[in-house]
Amino acid sequence: MGEVHDQYLGKQLTEETWRDFEALFEKHKGVRGGCWCTFHQVSSTDYNRMSKNQRKAFHEKRVQEGIATGLILYNNNDPVGWCQFGRGEIFEQINRNRAYKKLDSVKQVKADWRITCIFVDKDHRKKGLSRCILSEALKLIEDLGGGVVEAFPFDLPNSEKPNYNGTVSLFEREGFHKVDRLGKNIQLMRKNLKMEGIQQ
């Protein structure tokens, strides 16, 4: 992970590590207005119908069922970062997106995995941990079988707001390439992870 980040350790979100994910998100009031990282897993209608507590319960149930997962980053034993990733088919919000479905690149290549969110604890920002989290998540995805990984960073270079999707430059540094624009502000990017090593 590099000398600067040797004190950090990534673990997969499972039923056993859910309490650590819960602690990180409780500290930040569910993140992004109480999303609990459910936005991409459901339709817009269902997301808006759910309360914050219902979103939390929904995500926990999906983890218990082995549907939802991701990577938690720890500083010693404290959870300080998060990356949501999962099999392509579990992200209903993306699968329903009309602009996404119309892209030729989407018709030609099926995503095995998607990365939708990267989050760093407010007390651990400005340490380069977003790249650390992404790097650890990619290692875990490779361990889980690899394949085509999609990401959807916002391309808003002048924005000062927290970017929970990551940035284009962040993904480019980890070997992702630009594929298509998805709407005005989102850049669809891909990387191909192979079991024998990482290849484009």
Image (cartoon, rainbow, N blue to C red):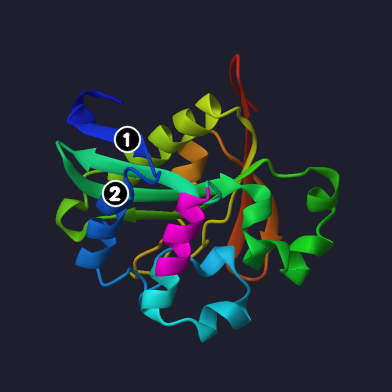
Q: Where in the figure is residue 44, as x and y percent of width and height?
A: 60, 78
Q: Residue at x 23, y 40 (%)?
A: 74
> Mark 1 highlights which residue?
10
Q: Main secondary structure of the magenta part?
A: helix
Furthest toward the top, the residue is 196
Q: Which stretch appears magenta?
A: 57-65
In primary-sequence order, the first of circles 1 and 2 is: 1
Could you say which is closer to the camera, residue 137 or residue 129?
137
The amino acid beneath tag 1 is: Gly
Q: Is residue 21 magenta?
A: no
Q: Where in the figure is residue 188, as x and y percent of width and height?
A: 64, 54
User: As drawn, is 15 to the left or to the right of 29?
Assistant: right
Q: Which mark is residue 59?
A: none
Q: Residues within 10 Å of mark 1 (few under 14, many from 20)?
A: many
Q: Where in the figure is residue 118, as x and y percent of width and height?
A: 40, 53
Quick check: 94 above or below 140? below
Q: Residue at x 60, y 29 (%)?
A: 146
Q: Residues within 10 Å of mark 2 (few under 14, many from 20)?
A: many
Q: Image quarter for residue 97?
A: bottom right
The amino acid beneath tag 2 is: Gly
State the quadrant of the N terminus.
top left
Q: Image quarter for residue 96?
A: bottom right
Q: Is residue 167 visible?
A: no
What separation in Å lies between label 1 and label 2 (alpha carbons)?
A: 9 Å
Under circle 1, the secondary element is: strand
Quick check: 34 above or below 166? below
Q: Where in the figure is residue 91, as x and y percent of width and height?
A: 62, 59
Quick check: 196 above or below 96? above
Q: Residue at x 52, y 50 (%)?
A: 65
Q: Is residue 63 magenta?
A: yes
> Mark 2 highlights which residue?
81
